[in-house]
Image (cartoon, helix red, strand yellow):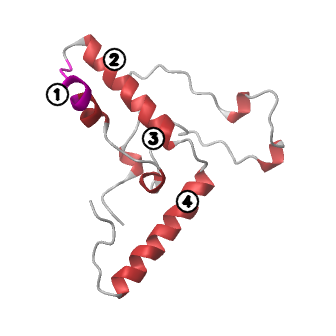
Amino acid sequence: MNSWHGSYYWCHLEDKYLILLTQGLEDLLVDDEKMEEEDPLRCKEGRDGDQLLAPFVCDECVFEDLEGRSPDWSKVEDECNMIALRRVILDSLWAREQSTVAANRREGEKYVAIHGSMGVKNPYHA
């Protein structure tokens, strides 16, 4: 569909933030039988289709917007900020369940195919 490849966007190796999984929730509002299988990569990498449901700006661009410069990886505070920004972005992408993302991705693929059959090469404007 476009240049987004979710599995290329993953958490920083030094990301030590706690990720709460559904298995750790004591009193669920939903029956266990209705919960999706836990993904071992949950909140650790992007998924194909995430970009259709959440506005995406890469962490380096956000850093540059906030600081007015590129991150300096030799500075501990810049590295910590980049790790936190990546975590925030991944958390926003994972605000939707896998089945929701997959269904919207399939709809997006149909949209592109229909427009392609009409000669439109890129129905999504940058």
- The secondary element bearing badge 3 is classed as loop
Q: Nearer the viewer, mark 2 or mark 1?
A: 1
Range of magenta residues: 64-73
Mark nearer the N terminus (3 vs 4): 3
User: Three-letter amino acid code at disc 2?
Assistant: Cys
Report the residue at 34% width, 87% height from top. 118
Residue 121 lies in the magenta-colored region: no
Report the residue at 45% width, 37% height from top. 90
Mark nearer the N terminus (1 vs 3): 3
Report the residue at 82% width, 48% height from top. 33
Mark nearer the N terminus (2 vs 4): 2
Quadrant location of the C terminus in the rendered image: bottom left
User: Three-letter amino acid code at disc 3?
Assistant: Glu
Distance from the alpha carbon under mark 3 to that under mark 4: 15 Å
- The secondary element bearing badge 4 is classed as helix
81 relative to 51 in the view: left or right? left
Distance from the alpha carbon under mark 4 to that under mark 1: 34 Å
- The secondary element bearing badge 1 is classed as loop
Residue 71 picture location, percent across and down: 20, 24
Q: Which residue is denoted by mark 1 in the rendering?
A: 70
The image quadrant of residue 56 is top left
Q: Which residue is denoted by mark 2 in the rendering?
A: 80
Q: Nearer the viewer, mark 1 or mark 3?
A: 1
Distance from the alpha carbon under mark 2 to that under mark 3: 18 Å
